[in-house]
Every structure is written in C-alpha cells, then in structure tokens.
C-alpha cells in the first residue's frame, strides 16, 4: 500500500471518530481540529442556554418597570382629566366667596384626585425601588454578551459603560469557534480525494453558511443589548428620585420632589386643611405662592417637560428599554406566538402615540423607535379636523395623551433576508457540523476501500506464479574434467511485473561429480 495514502486515510478516520484501531497510523491534526470545533460548540451552547432564561427575566423586569411609569402617568392623567369630578372636571370646584382667585374643590373631587395621585406616587416609588434589581439583571447580561460588567462608569458613576468588547465571554467563544472551523476547513484541503468528494464539498459549504447565519444573529444580539443598557441608564435611579423621591418626615417643602410635593399638597386639601381667608394651598396668590395642584399635575404629564419635572421622558426611556429587552429575548428564543415561525428571530419597535384633541380637531403623532433605539425614530402625523374635543365633563380646551406599545417584526440582515433565532442558528451550526463529519466519514470509508483494493491487487500480483517466454544465450569454459564457468544472459518477453527486471546477466560455476 502507498504509505502517504495510508497515512491520509488514517488521519481522516480518526477525525470523524472511526475505529482507528483498524486504520494505519498517521498524524492526528484533523482529529484535534474536529474535537476543538465540538468543544467550542458545546461552550457556546452552554452560554446560550444560560442567556435564554436570563433574557426572559430581563424582558419581564424591563416591561414591569415601563408598566410602573405608565401607570404613574395614567394616574396623573386621570386625576386631571378622568371625569367630571377630576381636577379639570365640571364638578371639581365650587366658588369661594372669600377669595375669587381661590379654587375650593368639592369633597368628591378632592377625594378622587387624592386617590389617583397617591396611586401615581406609589408607582413612581415602586420604580425607584425596583431599579437596582433591573440594573443588576442588565449588567449581568451585558457582561456576558458585550463584556461590560457595569452599566455605568466614571468617577461619578453616571457615564454609560457600553460597547461591544471582543473579550466578552460570548464574543471570545464565538471568535474561537470561527477560528477552529476555518482551521478545519483549511486542513481538509490537504486531502484532495476527500476534499473533492461532492458530499463533503456540500457539507463544508453548509457549515460555513450556518456559521455566517450564527454571526448575523450574534451581531444583532450585541446591538440590542447595547440599546437596552443605554435605555436603562437613561431612566436611572438618580433621575427617578429627582422626579419622584418620597418626602421625608418633617422635611421642608423646598426639598420635596415634584411628585412628593403634589402628593403632600393634595393630602392637605383632601383632609380639609384649607383656610378660606387665604384660599386653598393648591392656588397661586400673594399669601402662599403655591401653584394650583391642577397645574402641578399638568406639569407632571407634560410632553415638553424635562425628566426632573415630567414623567414622560422617563416613561419613554423605560418603554424603549422594554422594547429592546423584548428584542433580546426574541433574538435568542425566536418569535414564539408573535410569528408563525418560532425559529425566526424577532425584534420589537417602540410605538409612541400622542393624541391631541381640541376644538379644531384631532392631531395624532405616531413615532416608531426601531428596536427601542431613540436615535432611530420615524414619525407620522395624522390630522383629523372632523374629530373634535367634545367632552362636556371636562373644562379643558385641549387634551393630550400619550400611550406606548411594542410591535414585533422579523429580524432581517442587510440583504433583507430573515435571520434565525440564536437558539435555532445554534442548532443549525451543530447539525451542519455533524453532517460534515458524516460526509467525511463516508468519503474516508470509500477512499479506504479504494486504497485497500489497490493494495490487495498488488499483493495478489506478487504472489501469483509468472510464466513468460524467455530467450537465453551464454558461454561455457571447462577446467579439467569436473569444473566449468559460464556467463549467461536471459531476456523475459511480455514482462509486466514491476518487481523484477526484463533482462539479467548471470555468472555461474559448476562442479561435476563422478567420471574418471
């Protein structure tokens, strides 16, 4: 058997897990590379298996936080516009005979507004309490995916710590896997009879295609994780506390947050703590310098206010965080009930709808933030002059309300092709790797049969008797009566056996016994 062919067959047999005890000894290069691919596939699978439930937890925590801010907004909105007994309802106030500039709320109005404002305060307070847990989940996730152990950095702890680092656990594992597969593919090229096998060629192509698909999914996951971290940091604990930290017992009203202040003043009114000679504490006048409670609540739901005075900026940040967290979950686990194909990766866009109604009609502004990214916004405005504000229970001349939703769409690559979920992409890489091993295994067996058959044929030729036509000529010299020396040449016709020549020269000595 040709020794180089035998060695190649032995190496390939080992690489795909055949019984190497029957193979001729060779190098273990392909065996080592194949094992390295399998090892790193398992390492990557372990990471994905841990990220899958973590993404579900992060999505729920982000959605819960957005729900707290949304509930706070809704309760403040209801306190102002909810019904005829709201702060701007037609049944909210009664005239104050002592001070024409005063607003005296009815008992029903004061009680209803107090309940809504207290519920809003509770929701904002819950969001403050829940932030550390949410931030911790996001930090742990970001660390594995993008290599950022904390969401914030810097001496003051308020600088976004974001980016995609090649040293992250996920990035380094996929990088090593790519290297292993590249090395394996390159090594296969050395063994031409195997590399050129049609089944092996197809399996190699499928392996690279599945790896490319996995790369696309991982890139999308890293981007979505960055967006989520940025959103969560934008609605951080410090900003939440500035807007809605509870008031401390005995603290001066100048230290109260806007949410705490409106709650304290509303409690004072609802509990009957007003003086008709000075007007209620919910008004602006020369006696107390306070703004009407209705105006304070309006500020808290203003579309134009900052995060220190309005719920809206923080509400949008938390809604974007919820959308990006759901995108993370959709990229890892697939669409589930949101698409017809559970293996399809999906991302979620934040859809912000602002509806303003007044006496001239309705203006609806719909802003879509792709994947919850505040830098990727598209806006559509609809004006309907026929749908005007017609609410006999409310004294307001204009009402603006904001609502949010997260809308799923298939994740696509730059060419418009749908991208597999990370779980599905990982399955396909492992399946493609297994098929490559199977194709190589079959090719090795076929090659071994070819080499073995050639060796058997050669062995048979060596053992079979050979009869050839022969021509022979020579010269003999005798010495005495009993000895001779001869030189002979013989030629074999039709010789096809490479193990001996077609012609030879021999020198012979002979001794003859007997005679006299």
Image (cartoon, rainbow, N blue to C red):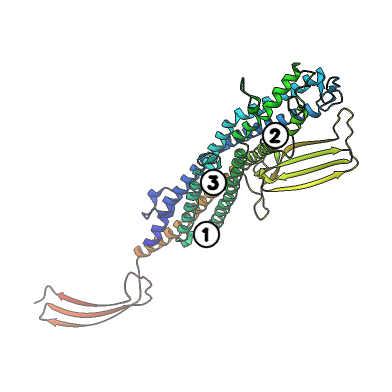
Q: Residues within 10 Å of mark 3 (few under 14, many from 20)?
A: many
C-alpha gap between disc 1 and disc 3: 21 Å
Q: Which residue is mark 3?
A: 430
Which percent across, then down, holds residue 377?
Answer: 71, 47
Which percent across, then down, holds residue 153?
Answer: 52, 41
Report the residue at 62% width, 31% height from top: 241
Q: Which residue is mark 1?
A: 197
Helix, strand or loop status at disc 3 = helix
In this rendering, position of residue 20 left or right of residue 214: left
* Nearer the camera: disc 1 or disc 3: 3
Quarter residue 406 falls in: top right
Helix, strand or loop status at disc 2 = helix
Which percent across, then down, holds residue 320?
Answer: 67, 40
* Nearer the camera: disc 3 or disc 2: 2
Residue situated in front as seen by the camera: 31 or 260: 260
**Quadrant in which the N terminus is drawn:** bottom left
Looking at marks 1 and 3 on the same chain, the residue that comes earlier in the sequence is marked by: 1
Residue situated in front as seen by the camera: 369 or 442: 369
The answer to whether 173 is drawn above or below residue 278 in the figure is: below
Q: Which mark is residue 311?
A: 2
Residue situated in front as seen by the camera: 411 or 14: 411
Report the residue at 47% width, 54% height from top: 184
Helix, strand or loop status at disc 1 = loop
Q: Can the viewer see residue 17 in this picture?
A: no
Which percent across, then down, holds residue 329?
Answer: 62, 39
Q: Residues within 10 Å of mark 1 (few under 14, many from 20)?
A: some
In this rendering, position of residue 144 left or right of residue 100: left
The answer to whether 304 is drawn above or below residue 474 in the figure is: above
């Amino acid at each position: 058997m040709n020794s180089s062919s035998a060695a190649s067959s032995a190496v390939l047999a080992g690489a795909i897990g055949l019984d190497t005890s029957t193979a001729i000894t060779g190098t273990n290069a392909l065996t080592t590379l194949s094992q390295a691919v399998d090892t790193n596939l398992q390492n990557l699978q372990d990471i994905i298996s841990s990220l899958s439930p973590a993404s579900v937890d992060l999505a729920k925590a982000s959605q819960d936080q957005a729900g707290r801010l949304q509930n706070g907004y809704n309760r403040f909105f209801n306190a102002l516009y909810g019904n005829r007994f709201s702060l701007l309802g037609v049944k909210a106030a009664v005239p104050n005979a002592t001070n024409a500039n005063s607003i005296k709320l009815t008992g029903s109005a004061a009680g209803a507004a107090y309940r809504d404002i207290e519920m809003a305060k509770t929701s904002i307070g819950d969001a403050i309490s829940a932030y550390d847990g949410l931030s911790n989940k996001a930090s742990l996730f970001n660390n594995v995916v993008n290599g950022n152990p904390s969401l914030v950095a810097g001496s003051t702890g308020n600088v976004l710590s974001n980016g995609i680092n090649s040293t992250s656990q996920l990035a380094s594992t996929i990088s090593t896997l790519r290297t292993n597969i590249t090395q394996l593919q390159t090594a296969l090229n050395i063994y031409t009879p195997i590399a050129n096998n049609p089944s092996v060629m197809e399996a190699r192509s499928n392996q690279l295609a599945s790896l490319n698909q996995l790369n696309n999914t991982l890139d999308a996951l890293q981007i979505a994780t960055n967006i989520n971290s940025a959103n969560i940091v934008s609605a951080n604990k410090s900003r939440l506390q500035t807007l809605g930290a509870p008031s401390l017992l005995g603290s001066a009203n100048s230290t109260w947050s806007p949410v705490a202040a409106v709650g304290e003043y509303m409690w004072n009114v609802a509990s009957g703590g007003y003086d008709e000679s000075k007007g209620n504490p919910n008004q602006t006048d020369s006696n107390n310098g306070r703004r009407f409670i209705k105006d304070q609540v309006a500020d808290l739901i203003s579309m134009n206010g900052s995060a220190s005075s309005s719920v809206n900026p923080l509400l949008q940040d938390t809604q974007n965080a919820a959308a990006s967290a759901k995108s993370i979950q959709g990229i890892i686990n697939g669409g589930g009930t949101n698409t017809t194909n559970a293996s399809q990766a999906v991302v979620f866009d934040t859809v912000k709808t602002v509806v303003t109604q007044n006496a001239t009609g309705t203006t609806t502004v719909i802003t879509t933030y792709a994947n919850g990214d505040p830098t990727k916004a598209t806006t559509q405005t609809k004006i309907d002059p026929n749908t005007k504000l017609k609410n006999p229970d409310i004294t307001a001349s204009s009402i603006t309300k904001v609502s949010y939703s997260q809308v799923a769409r298939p994740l696509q690559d730059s060419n418009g092709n749908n991208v597999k979920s990370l779980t599905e992409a990982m399955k396909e890489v492992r399946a493609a790797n297994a098929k490559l091993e199977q194709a190589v295994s079959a090719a090795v067996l076929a090659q071994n049969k070819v080499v073995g058959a050639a060796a058997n044929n050669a062995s048979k030729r060596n053992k079979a008797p050979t009869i050839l036509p022969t021509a022979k000529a020579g010269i003999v010299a005798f010495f005495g009566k009993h000895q001779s020396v001869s030189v002979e040449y013989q030629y074999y016709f039709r010789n096809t056996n490479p193990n001996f020549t077609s012609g030879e020269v021999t020198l012979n000595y002979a001794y003859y016994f007997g005679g006299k």
